[in-house]
Image: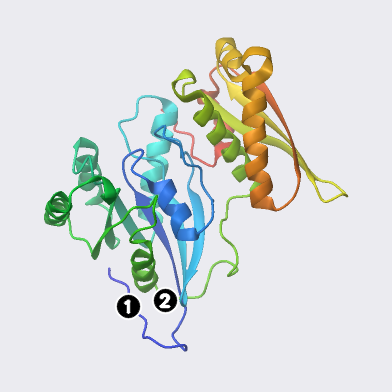
């Protein structure tokens, strides 16, 4: 189905719709969400597969409200958590009004992109092709990639962007605003995300965890916000727990003399304070919870469905 285009002018009817961002891990979906919204609403990391839940960023362009669904990267799942993340991504695509398919300009249509194209054939919504990281590839290669992708699947529009620098973002915004369905806004105009602040704060700490530890810590780690108390002086007291699966991982997160956990806490506290606009007192704890990846409660906390098999 193709959305009806609103007529120009100040009296144009409002439009509102959900736009799912689909792509392989590390293609730049989280960076693109933050660039479109103009604020940080989802974590960004050099490590792949960092997005686990459907984080929604919200922006208003002209008379349209665009609700962005930043899905987990689609990859070949090996563990229960992997399967849950891939299931979540495809659920986001099927539930959206419009699908943005992201390709990495350097990688082109590789095996992961081929798998995505094949599965997207079962998704009936309009699709927009977004080729990201164009600053890393010669123009001739970009044009060839765009041609090959459009021969592979029908796209309403094709965009070449750099989510990191912002190139092409304004044109993409205008097109998304035009393509979402007519209808009233779902959220207040000044709202930028539907992720609760407790969840976003946990995601920020998880991002700092990945940034500091790189390859030292596997993906079997998660962060939960245990308490958030707004104090009389206007500051917030936040307690979070980092869960790992083994004692050896706990020692890595703590670091020698607690240096690593202190550094993670300082970086997370600074960013949470910037987003909330208030002083933050952040207290981090590290606990071992064996096989948390098989615990349904942890999946509910992350906002993703627990796969039974």
Quarter of the image where one finds residue 281: top right
Residue at image position (51%, 47%) is 42
Say what secondary structure mark 2 lies in.
Answer: loop
Q: Residues within 10 Å of mark 2 (few under 14, many from 20)?
A: many
**Horizontal relation, residue 25 to residue 194: left or right:** left
Residue at image position (33%, 57%) is 99
**Horizontal relation, residue 82 to residue 252: left or right:** left
Instruction: Work out whether residue 103 can be spotted.
Output: no
| Residue nearer the viewer, 59 or 182 | 59
Cβ–Cβ below 8 Å for labels 1 and 2? yes
In the displayed orientation, state which residue is furthest to the top: 248
List the residue tagged with mark 1: 4
As drawn, 193 above or below 157: above
As drawn, 125 above or below 65: above
Q: Position of residue 130 (x, y in %)?
A: 28, 55
Quarter of the image where one finds residue 307: top left
Quadrant placement of the C terminus: top left
Q: Residues within 10 Å of mark 1 (few under 14, many from 20)?
A: few
Residue at image position (84%, 46%) is 231
Q: Position of residue 88 (x, y in %)?
A: 42, 43
Colour scheme: rainbow
| Residue nearer the viewer, 290 or 295 | 290
Quadrant placement of the N terminus: bottom left
């Amino acid at each position: 189905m193709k959305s009806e285009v609103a007529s120009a002018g100040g009296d144009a009817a409002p439009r509102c719709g959900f736009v799912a961002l689909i792509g392989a891990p590390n293609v730049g979906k989280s960076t693109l969400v933050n660039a479109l919204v103009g604020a940080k609403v989802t974590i960004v990391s050099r490590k792949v597969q960092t997005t686990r839940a459907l984080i929604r960023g919200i922006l208003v362009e002209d008379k349209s409200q665009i609700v962005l669904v930043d899905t987990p990267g689609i990859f070949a799942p090996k563990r229960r958590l992997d399967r849950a993340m891939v299931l979540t991504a495809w659920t986001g695509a099927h539930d959206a009004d419009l699908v943005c398919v992201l390709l990495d300009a350097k990688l082109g249509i590789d095996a992961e992109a081929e798998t995505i194209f094949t599965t997207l054939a079962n998704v009936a919504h309009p699709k927009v092709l977004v080729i990201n990281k164009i600053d890393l590839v010669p123009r001739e290669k970009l044009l060839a990639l765009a041609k090959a992708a459009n021969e592979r699947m029908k796209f309403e529009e094709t965009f070449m962007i750099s989510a990191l620098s912002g190139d092409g973002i304004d044109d993409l915004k205008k097109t998304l605003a035009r393509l979402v369905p007519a209808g009233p806004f779902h959220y207040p105009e000044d709202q930028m995300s539907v992720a609760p602040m407790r969840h976003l704060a946990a995601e920020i700490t998880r991002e700092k965890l990945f940034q500091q530890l790189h390859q030292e810590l596997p993906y079997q780690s998660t962060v939960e916000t245990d308490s958030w108390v707004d104090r009389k002086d206007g500051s917030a007291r936040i307690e979070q727990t980092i869960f790992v699966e083994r004692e050896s991982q706990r020692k890595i997160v703590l670091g020698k003399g607690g240096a690593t956990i202190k550094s993670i806490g300082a970086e997370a506290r600074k960013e949470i304070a910037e987003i909330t606009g208030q002083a933050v007192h952040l207290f981090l704890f590290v606990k071992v919870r064996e096989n948390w990846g098989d615990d349904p409660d942890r999946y509910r906390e992350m906002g993703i469905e627990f796969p039974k098999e």
